[in-house]
Image (cartoon, grey):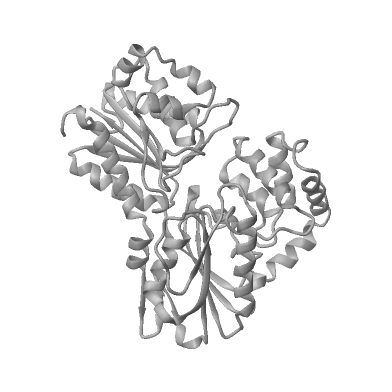
Amino acid sequence: METDTNLKNIILSIINAGIDAAKPSKLMRDKINYSGGVLSIDDESHDLNNYDKVYVIGFGKISAAMALEIENILGPRISDGLVITNSTDHSELDIIKVRIGDHPILDDKVIIASREILDICSKATQKDLVICLISGGGSALFELLPEEIKLKDMQELTKLLLHSGASIDEINKVRKCFSSVKNGGLLKFIHPAECVSLIISDVVGDHIESIASSPTFYDTTSFKRAYEILQFYHLLEKVPVNISEFLLYGLRNESEESKATSSYKSCLSNIIIGRNYESLLAAEETAKQYQLNTIILSRKIQGEARDVAKVFGAIIDEISERNIPVPKPACIIAGGETTVTVKGQGIGGRNQELALSTLISLKESKSKFAFASCGSDGIDGVTSAAGGYVDYKMWEVINNKKIFPNEYLINNDSFHFLKAVNGLIHISPGQTNVMDIMIGIIN
């Protein structure tokens, strides 16, 4: 391996390899084939000759990129389509329309665009096929609220959940209870047409019921579970009155609601075509090109960022001192999605806070290390950065500039700390969205 003066460039190269492997352009060209009117996706085939029209709908951070690829594959076989994304940086499409909304907080632009999608669904008959393109961020980028719930109610609920430390799985379990299209609800608008959903996963474990709050998949999510989550994070007394009343009504009528939604659950096929693990494998392959001994620790990293950092710090120290679980020069690779309970007034994101916390955990270490955590979607929190990078040499900068890392951590201000030590990671947003990529190098 090269000298440690180039650690940052090496880590960024490894991360970029992981991101490239999960771009829709690669995933969809590798896994989807269209020949003789037959659409093949992995091991599943659909003869489009049996359908009059094919409609394409979608939502999520990379739905426009997915739409471009499905347009390239199917071309004029697509009758109409519309996707909703939060990225203005996308290619022009010939058939499928693109609408822009905000993320992670639902806005009125998404509400309007979602009705356009439902209008397309209403045109589909039992002789038609609807292809639904789903990616991370879809929970905020597609919505039809019940009449009792106002937009401002949902916005306030989402803000409370995002700052509570709840996982994305927990957040989506709550969201489903206050939506007419989540948790399989979209299927009643698509019915009687058939539906195939192509999904790029951004959740730990790749559980379909969690991705974009599963608009085309029904599970047993309940108002009782939503109540328990809100109670656990001490939010029951903070949610808007309309949310509280709707929740209590749902608790009293749970069984009837479940029957009504589940009656449409047999209308489709859900196919995951991209996931975090593919990024980790590509990252590992690139790390080996730098003559690093590699190990993929997990694709299911989750928990409070500052707690997870202590585990990464311990592993880095163990490799440095004892060459366990992999000998030096080593590269540890992981994926997942941590959380941050926001108590301070600073700005940052889960990846930046993870990087800062890992550096703090190794303050007394003699390890020659570098560590980075990066959102594959190019976005970390409400900052301009995608993640954060730290290494053992930063302590000299910190001491010279009289910077106090713990003060930044207490204030949830990882962005400004990393900016001060040249540790911010910037990548183009909207390339993919398969959770986070975490890389550590130990010399």
Q: Is residue 31 above or below residue 21?
A: below
Q: Is residue 247 above or below residue 118?
A: above
Residue at 41% of width from left, 72% of height from top? 71
Total marks in image: 0
Counting from the top left corner in percent of width and height, residue 23 is at 36, 57
Counting from the top left corner in percent of width and height, residue 363 is at 37, 17
Q: Residue furthest left?
A: 2
Q: Is residue 18 above or below residue 439?
A: below
Counting from the top left corner in percent of width and height, residue 204 is at 49, 47
- 181, 203: nearer the viewer: 181
Using residue 320 as the reference point, say whether residue 70 is left or right of it.
right
Whether residue 415 is visible: yes
Q: Is residue 193 above or below residue 365?
A: below
Counting from the top left corner in percent of width and height, residue 144 is at 68, 61
Using residue 393 as the reference point, say whether residue 343 is left or right of it.
right
Location of residue 2 by image quarter: top left
Location of residue 288 by image quarter: top left
Whether residue 56 is visible: no
Residue at 52% of width from left, 65% of height from top? 83
The C terminus: image quadrant: top left
Residue at 32% of width from left, 17% of height from top? 397
Using residue 3 as the reference point, say whether residue 85 is left or right of it.
right
The N terminus: image quadrant: top left
Residue at 17% of width from left, 39% of height from top? 291
Using residue 185 as the reference point, say whether residue 337 is left or right of it.
left
